[in-house]
Amino acid sequence: MRIAVCVNHVPDTETKIKIAADKRAIDPAGVNYMLSPYDEIAVEQGLRLREKFGGEVIALGLGGEQHKETLRKALAMGVDRAVLLKDEAERDSFAVAQGLAEELTALHPDVLLFGRQSIDYDSAQVGTLVAEMLGLPSVAVVVKMEVEDGKVICEREIEGGHEVVETQLPAVFLTQKGLNEPRYPSLKGIMAAKKKPIEEKPAIAVDVRVEAIVMHKPPAKGSGKIVGTDKSAVPELVKLLHDEAKVL
């Protein structure tokens, strides 16, 4: 079985984000980066499928030189090889998907895994865009996955519950928390990952359809207001929710 996992290089969840001087991107100074947490789940699922069915797991990333750090993490977890589609320019989701789809067309994976979304822009578009470009079925927000004889039965989250769906391979799957618990890279894996080569290829040139015009932080939260400590405060609370908060 050939398994491809697409991964992204994102700011660490504990990093304090600052807006760059041009107000169109984040300031990279002092920012620590990491493998997107949902992508870790995708990598783990790929490794489990390989352990059960054999074959290879290929980690695929699109971005600049710094993305090698994330691919090294995937190698340390146990993927067989890594490919960087190199492009230092900013891309929108559609342009990222085009670059990945071009490479994946040549790879012909049986299983194609993404995290449900990347935690930087949270657009949750790339995986399903790639599936559409490749003409493959896709299942998103997967929390359970059973593969047998080329058939896949998935349980996925929907609003208010879970849905069970069935599809055939090859297919695209977008992983959600709860599907598995990603393994920690072992010391042996970390040392081996440092020696493994990362294949570099230029990402295909595409037009960017969406660009950031201005970026700003959300307004700071205001101070709270206590209107009372017993039931006598209810009328005033209702009034404030209606007139000020405008949620009633």
Image: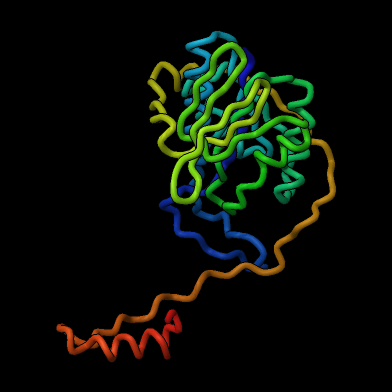
Q: Is residue 82 above or below residue 203?
A: above
Q: Residue at x 59, y 10 (%)?
A: 55
Q: Position of residue 218 (x, y in %)?
A: 51, 71
**Position of residue 69 in the picture relative to residue 232 (left or right):** right
In this orientation, does residue 35 appear? no
Q: Residue at x 55, y 41 (%)?
A: 116
Q: Residue at x 64, y 15 (%)?
A: 2
Q: Residue at x 28, y 91 (%)?
A: 236
**Position of residue 204 in the picture relative to residue 243 (left or right):** right
In this orientation, does residue 83 appear? yes
**Position of residue 9 in the picture relative to residue 189 (left or right):** right
Q: Quadrant of residue 223?
A: bottom left
Q: Position of residue 5 (x, y in %)?
A: 60, 28
Q: Is residue 171 above or below residue 244?
A: above
Q: Quadrant of residue 28?
A: bottom right
Q: Position of residue 196 (x, y in %)?
A: 58, 17
